[in-house]
């Protein structure tokens, strides 16, 4: 893969407020909820697929980037989440087969919908349709990314920053966990990884009451500004104040589902939501 500059993946607050989903009538709270929900699916499925954390992190960044270009009303959040996991597993050289991804998403849906876990028939028409949709959505994602899928995560900076600051190793795990949580927000499309890394290091230090150098300001050495660090902390604090994200049916393109029961109940809700 040829890596090029990724600066054009970063958006302003104004651009995010005028996202394709907002233009299609989805309010900020609903978009935030569905972004978190999709990222939760990516994280959970990655664990079930026994993928390294880097795969889930890459999948979540691709997920956010995609919905900065396309609307939640036109591309189903579950479909995009599954495709992002599948694509990220290949990008991070830990590939999983399409059937493995679909089986895991099938089990996850059964659990979330409190349905009995049934065998997913790999020869059924439904499975073939889901596999086709998975491939088609992956192509949409690649097209919207311009086939440039390079992702730089804040995690790689955390250890170096803490080592340079001479701080205790216990901050590393806390900062790492905060970096993982940050991927459920739009921080990855608003700030460079260096800024997010500084933000989570600062938040971890505050939580453990570890002082950081102020004179000169420690963040200056890492190409960050105090305003960016403060914003990272504010976004994380808001994330932790929210209840567990639940699925909200807003997509006009039908449901990406494995169960006829689930499909029937969700179709009623989406019709009501869109009227």
Image: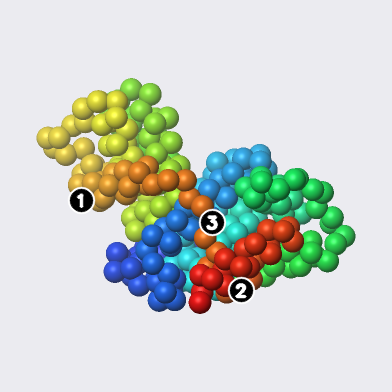
Q: Nearer the viewer, mark 2 or mark 1?
A: 2
| Residue at image mark 1 | 227
> Which residue does the image show at 29% across and 30% down from the upper left?
207
> Which residue does the image show at 37% across and 50% down from the upper left?
193
Tell me, for residue 253, which label it has, or none.
2
Q: Is residue 79 above or below residue 69?
A: above
Q: Earlier in the sequence, mark 2 or mark 1?
A: 1
User: Measured from the top left, where is residue 122 in percent x and y?
Assistant: 84, 56
On-image quarter of the N terminus = bottom right
- 12 relative position to 61: left or right: left
User: Measured from the top left, where is residue 270 in percent x and y?
Assistant: 56, 68
Q: Earlier in the sequence, mark 3 or mark 2?
A: 3
> Which residue does the image show at 76% across and 54% down from the upper left?
99
**Cα–Cα gap, marks 3 and 1:** 33 Å
Q: How many neighbours does mark 3 have within 10 angstroms: few (below 14), some (14-19), or many (20 or more)?
A: some
**Cα–Cα gap, marks 2 and 1:** 40 Å
Q: Nearer the viewer, residue 58 or 177?
A: 177
Q: Are marks 3 and 1 in contact (CB under 8 Å)?
A: no
> Which residue does the image show at 38% across and 35% down from the upper left?
175
Q: How many neighbours does mark 1 have within 10 angstroms: few (below 14), some (14-19), or many (20 or more)?
A: few
Which element is circle 3 on? loop
Which element is circle 1 on? helix
| Residue at image mark 3 | 247
Q: Is residue 220 above or below residue 82?
A: above
Q: Earlier in the sequence, mark 3 or mark 1?
A: 1
- 194 relative position to 119: left or right: left
Residue at the farthest left position: 215
Q: Is residue 120 visible?
A: yes
Q: Nearer the viewer, mark 3 or mark 1?
A: 3
């Amino acid at each position: 893969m040829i890596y090029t500059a990724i600066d054009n993946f970063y958006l302003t607050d104004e651009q995010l407020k005028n996202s394709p989903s907002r233009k299609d009538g989805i309010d900020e709270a609903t978009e935030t909820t569905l972004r978190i929900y999709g990222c939760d699916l990516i994280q959970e499925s990655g664990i079930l697929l026994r993928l390294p954390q880097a795969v889930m992190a890459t999948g979540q960044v691709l997920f956010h980037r995609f919905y900065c270009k396309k609307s939640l009303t036109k591309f189903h959040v579950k479909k995009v989440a599954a495709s992002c996991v599948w694509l990220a597993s290949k990008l991070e050289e830990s590939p999983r087969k399409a059937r493995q991804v679909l089986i895991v998403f099938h089990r996850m849906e059964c659990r979330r919908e409190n349905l009995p876990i049934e065998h997913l028939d790999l020869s059924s028409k439904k499975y073939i349709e889901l596999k086709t949709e998975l491939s088609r959505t992956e192509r949409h994602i690649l097209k919207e990314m311009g086939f440039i899928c390079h992702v730089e995560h804040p995690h790689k900076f955390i250890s170096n920053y803490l080592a340079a600051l001479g701080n205790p190793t216990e901050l590393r795990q806390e900062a790492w966990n905060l970096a993982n949580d940050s991927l459920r927000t739009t921080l990855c499309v608003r700030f460079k990884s260096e800024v997010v890394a500084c933000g989570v290091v600062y938040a971890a230090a505050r939580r453990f009451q570890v002082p950081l150098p102020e004179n000169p300001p420690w963040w200056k050495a890492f190409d960050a500004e105090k305003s960016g660090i403060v914003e990272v902390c504010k976004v994380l604090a808001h994330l932790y104040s929210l209840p567990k994200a639940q699925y909200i049916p807003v997509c006009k393109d039908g449901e990406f589902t494995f169960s006829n029961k689930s499909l029937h109940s969700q179709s009623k809700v989406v019709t009501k939501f869109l009227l």
